[in-house]
Amino acid sequence: MKILAIESSCDETAAAVVEDGRRILSNVVSTQAAIHARFGGVVPEIASRHHLENIVPVVSKAMEDAGLDFPALDAVAVTYAPGLIGSLLVGVQAAKGIAFVHGKPLVPVHHIAGHIQAPFLASPEEIPLPALALVVSGGHTHLFEMPEPGVYHLRGRTRDDAAGEAFDKVAKLLGLGYPGGPAIDRLAQGANDRAVDFTPARFKDGRPDFSFSGLKTAVLHHVRRQGIEPVADQGAVPSEVRDLAASFQRAVVVALLQRLRQEAERARPRSLLLTGGVAANTVLRREAAATAALLGLPLFVPPIALSTDNAAMIGAAGFVAYTRGTRAGWDLNPEAHMPLETLVYEAKSTPGRGAV
Ligand code: KG4
Ligand code: ZN
């Protein structure tokens, strides 16, 4: 079964064709990162305008790369929540148009469900379920338990900033550009990650939740105290900035993996998944492997191109949703926010809050 998937929730216009939720026939991503870089973050109005310009060429390229015409498709899947509303709208309208004209079912996909499904695209072996998934991106930091494909139980979440957001804000503060994650990752290599000691956030209720805004403020205080100036020349970053970046990165990685371990010890899953844009982080990938080994669990991490936003993961989650009977009506509307307490794909003609 061949699904055309469309993703436009943030600043990547993406389309892919995925067969049976596993085999990628094409995967096209047009990123706007360079356009938003000069603003130090994504500007929603600019993002939606670029999605409008890019969506037709990106979908056409995905179909061409897959060597298919629209009639050969079995369904069209699209990210409809959560994300920037103007950006989501472009993908949803394009998907509706293609599905309507060619008489194909329209499958609504939650962006995070896409991230969780990404490791399944890349793994040649079966991933044992239940799985515990750590989803870390610019907009999300969540721990989900997945007892079966398409059923996601939220176990932990950030109470303020997402991990990627913290990377981006700290990078901006230090003058390292946007997106911040890759810049910090690169600069931290070989730097002293013990130079600054950051205290991890703790919660009285003991839940495996996350908090990164205190860490961001601690970095800010350190910068002010030490009189650190934003970096002017990216080719000559002072060692105190590199050490600070490395110490911040270490604090994020430790916080993420502490909660992953805590929840794994409680829930006793059969596998661990690490996914989302921040899963591209070199130290997180390495340390997550060590945590998994300690727990005696297999860890599945998608390659970087499938960790960051892409449409292949939406095709994979779309297949799961489709096989569970989920369809959208022509009145499908994007949602900027979608509660994620318990996300269970089930048969619905039009998705509403709480049921996708
Ligand atoms: O999943 P994604 O592409 O988009 C969202 O759904 O948000 O994630 C983007 C986020 C950005 O915050 C970016 O700084 C972060 O992922 N990121 C990284 C790395 N590569 C991307 N963070 C840390 N280390 C990286 N190597
Ligand atoms: Zn994402």
Image: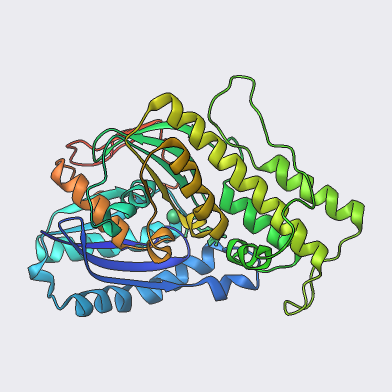
Mark yes or no: residue 265 visible. Answer: yes
Specify the quarter for ligand 2. bottom left
Query: Relative to the observer, which residue lies in front, 69 or 236?
Result: 236
| Residue 335 in the figure: left or right of residue 38 | left
Residue depicted at x 27% and y 73%: 59
Mark yes or no: residue 329 visible. Answer: no
Query: Relative to the observer, which residue lies in front, 159 or 21?
Result: 21
Q: Quadrant of the C terminus?
A: top left
Residue 232 position in % (x across, y down):
79, 75
In which quarter of the view is residue 149 placed?
top left
| Residue 326 in the figure: left or right of residue 285 | left
| Residue 289 in the figure: left or right of residue 106 | right
Residue 17 position in % (x across, y down):
21, 66
Residue depicted at x 61% and y 43%: 254
Query: Relative to the observer, which residue lies in front, 203 or 213?
Result: 203
Query: Relative to the observer, which residue lies in front, 253 or 29?
Result: 253
Instruction: Look at the picture and state if 246 lies above or below 143.
Output: below
Residue depicted at x 37% and y 51%: 115
Q: Quadrant of the N terminus?
A: bottom left
In which quarter of the view is residue 240 placed?
bottom right
Residue 164 position in % (x across, y down):
57, 53
Residue 120 position in % (x across, y down):
28, 52
